[in-house]
Image: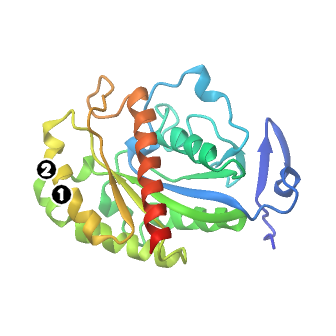
Amino acid sequence: MFAAHAIRFVLFGLLVPAFALFAKEPSDLQLFLLIGQSNMAGRGKVEPTDQVPHPRIVMFDKNNVWVPATDPVHFDKPKIAGVGLCSEFARRVAAAEPQAVVGLVPCAFGGTTLDQWRPGSALYTNAVARARAAMQSGRLRAILWHQGEGDSAPAKTATYPARFSAMIAQLRSDLNAPDVPVLVGELGRYRDAYAGFNAMLPHVHQAVPNSARVSAEGLGANSDNVHFNRAALIEFGRRYFDAYERLRKEAAQR
């Protein structure tokens, strides 16, 4: 059931077998794959409360070990990694599903373009490998994507829906999850340069079945005017959860 390199959990500094945390071997984690660039990884200021773990939220660390989830969840650029939208998203899932244990699988990397996520690339291959390893412990419930600052020039924006839909189709196939929901967030509306990209996103929604666009209306930025600030990321996480719930309800009605 577990490979020789069995997935383990680290709980408050103690290394223990994964199954020691549960009544049975862990096969029922509710998994969420996090991909994209820096605004998915998170650059919000980390406060002490962000480092208090939730008892039912874990994250897959850089060594493919399950540990209690605290910010920063991502490790793409340790010196600047911060609060991301995934933490509030996970808290909302845990609150809505009192029996669930939520597993975050962080794979986003700052400063990347969509072409750097094409199938066969290093980032794509890493995300697939980590997701497959994590899926030994549960079921993939959704893919959370935020990216586009690196593709906001008009020439790249024009081809984005086709390129993104092709990547997602291959990713769903590689993970044997053909209907897994995909949540795609807008870029910050605080920069006029991103307006064209945001106007294009409805075409992404049309091109990718079982996907949702998440509004960034009213969300603020750090002083760099590129990255969402901590308060914005918390609100963004709520909006991603709301979009996820809408897709779940729509699927239940089909």
The residue tagged 1 is 200
Query: Quick check: 55 left or right of 184?
Result: right
Closest to the observer: 100 or 21? 100
Q: Residue at x 13, y 37 (%)?
A: 192
Q: Residues within 10 Å of mark 2 (few under 14, many from 20)?
A: some
- Distance between the alpha carbons at the discs numbered 1 and 2: 6 Å
Position of the N terminus, as image quadrant, is: bottom right
10 sits to left or right of 38: right
Residue, x 78% and y 50% (percent of image)?
Answer: 9
Residue at mark 2: 196
Residue at position x 40%, y 39% in the image: 236
**Total marks in image:** 2
Which of the two residues, 242 or 109, is positioned nearer the viewer here? Answer: 242
Instruction: Residue 155: name its quadrant.
Output: bottom left
- The vertical placement of 44 against 25, above or below, is above
Note whether residue 152 is visible. Answer: no
> Which residue is rendered at x = 52% and y = 74% of the image?
177
Decide: marks 1, 2 in contact (CB < 8 A)? yes
- Name the residue furthest front: 253
Q: In the rendered structure, find residue 143 and report the number of the disc placed on it.
A: none
The image shows residue 132 at horizontal and vertical percentages of: 61, 68
What's under tag 2, amino acid-wise? Gly
Looking at the image, residue 187 lies above or below residue 127 = above
Left or right, residue 11 beside residue 119 = right
Which is more toward the observer, 195 or 251? 251
Is residue 28 in view? yes
* Nearer to us in this view, 217 or 104: 217
Q: Position of residue 49 (x, y in %)?
A: 61, 23
Left or right: 13 as drawn, with respect to 87? right
Give the class, few, some or many, for how many residues have Cα within 10 Å of label 1's Cα (few <14, many ≥20).
some
